[in-house]
Amino acid sequence: MDVVLEADQLGKRYGKTWALRDCSLRLPAGRIAALVGPNGAGKSTLLHLAVGLLRPDAGAVRVFGGSPYNNTESLADIGFVAQDTPLFRDFTAAELVTAGEKLNRRWDGALARNRLAQLGVPPDKPVGKLSGGQRAQVALALALAKRPRLLLLDEPVASLDPLARREFLQSLMGSVADAGTTVLLSSHLLADLERVCDYLIVLNAARVQLVGTVDEIVAGHRQLIGPRHDGGPLGGVAAVVRASHTDRQSTLLVRTDGPITDPSWTVREVSLEDLILAYLADGDTTASHTEWGVPA
Amino acid sequence: MIWLAWRQHRKQLLFTLLGFVLLAAVMIPIGVAMRSTFADLGLPACVRDLARADVAPATVEACEAGFRRFTNRYGALNLVAVLLVMLPMLVGLFWGAPLVAREVEQGTHRFAWTQGISRRRWVLVKFGLAGAVVLTAAVGYGLGMSWWVDPLTRAAHEGRLGYIVFDLQGIVPIGYTLFAVALGIFAGTLWRRMLPAMAITLVGYVGVRAAVAVLARPHYQPARTLTFPVTGTGEPIGDRGNWILSSGVRNPDGQMVVSDTRMQCPPGALGPTGRGCGAELGVEPGAYNWQLYQPAGRFWLFQGIEAGIFVLLALVLVYVAVRAIRRIA
């Protein structure tokens, strides 16, 4: 299986704070991958490292086998849409397509124009005056016109209303399905990703919490409900991700490594959303409590 | 990339050109009027005569009167000249500060740097184009100002080396403009916000310019001294256009009696109290006027040194900015 994006002990530091740390992952070719995490988890940092805007402070990141930093060769194969879809606001959409043509060796201007015509984006209006949804579509069209093998999208739908969000993701899926483009798409909106993504990377507090295909991840986790549990080992459970207790009953979200045979537990499947939330809720807030001077 | 830079900055270029045309439309008629008055008063001949060593005292007197008339009419334009000194700073504010800061503030650098071209090329074209534009503007400004301010400087006793007029003409405006733009780029790259970058450019430009002009410029070359006796007639010959750094009256023992002035008494003249000339101030017989000055002939040398300093500063600032751009994401 071809690996498009590979991170090995990757780290990036801003001053003393690590924005991303010990990040190791491999993104196989042809996947639509979701990069999930709360704000400040390091999603943008990871994407910026992948597209070569940032240089790693630790470890390495490789795209198509090469380091992307300051590397126009790998850049030609990457389509990137940054957060808030920044475009030259006084340019018209048509001028932006021309700009792309001037800045790229491989450029499919016809693809961009066709897309934008189909979506009803006016070609002669400054993009700063377009709606957020249209602007995102322009940015996506520009990224696709590079005919990239890897498409990196940083929170492309965060600022869109639900309708525009759905349209954007639909048009994205429509265009990458045929070309076999690998997509890595960051978001904190879980419901949208569940529909379109088949691969998942969960980041929280600068670290990777979970990586894998959606099917494997869902299959590998179970919710257990049973008598109050004191934390001892359970048969078939690799790790307890999250536990909540009442006086007599415990609800556990666990990662499994075999069948759960203990009859005292009721075993349920978990939805992807619950699962991600369980991983994200696992943040460390001790430092924050100390800083605020309140008891944890 | 050149197309992109042109498309991004063409409006700015248009406004810059428009500003220049407006400025020229105002300044050229004034300059023409000033020159014709200068000629009508017979002052070009005076400039020639006063430079000679054997000039007759009557001619000096007539010429000084002519210069006074000219200065009385056009002296107020020195205020305009003060405003014009600020022009290079404006170029720095509006061309330098936004060049990188605006891109980073709007996030468009993430678009530009993730297309097929390297950051190095982006920097080269963008800085190169902005540099070419401001260089052309600065050369035009320097030449135009040299022409415009010429009658004013010739009429003024301190000549072209004096503050403000020195800064307006010749090649120093090129140095100043490049420095202002480089400072803007530097501030915009390090602070990455347009408003702080503009503020830093403004403060930095005024600060560095003032510091160099006041602290460094008088010492580009060892200053010369000129002495002439208090008792005597006529001004010292041939000191028109010299830049006088400090002056005063000294007693024969070398002690400064009155500073920042010069004194001339006809032989045998007495002060109001009937004692010797200037005796009330402590001036003893045999006292002499003393001047520390830079001779007028050093104008181009000083222009070269000052322009060199600012071009060098500009290069350092641009170098630091280019290094810093590598760390922006």
Image (cartoon, helix red, strand yellow):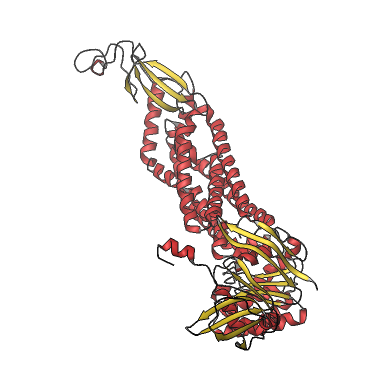
**Observer-nearest residue: A159 or B247?**
A159
Residue B31 is situated, as x and y percent measured from the top left of the image, at 47, 45
Vertical position of residue B93 compared to residue A108: above or below: above
Closer to us: A290 or B44: A290
**Quarter that holds the N terminus of chain B:** bottom right
Is residue B63 shown left or right of residue A16? left
* B159 up-or-down from B232: above or below: below
Q: Quadrant of residue B275?
A: top left
Q: Is residue A191 left or right of residue A10?
A: left
Residue found 39% across the figure and 44% down from its top: B79
Q: Quadrant of residue A103?
A: bottom right
Front residue of this view, candidates A216 and A184: A216
Left or right of B52 on screen, residue A168: right
Count of marks placed on residues: 0
Pinpoint residue A46: horizontal percent, then vertical percent: 64, 66
Within the image, what quadrant is residue A236 found in?
A: bottom right
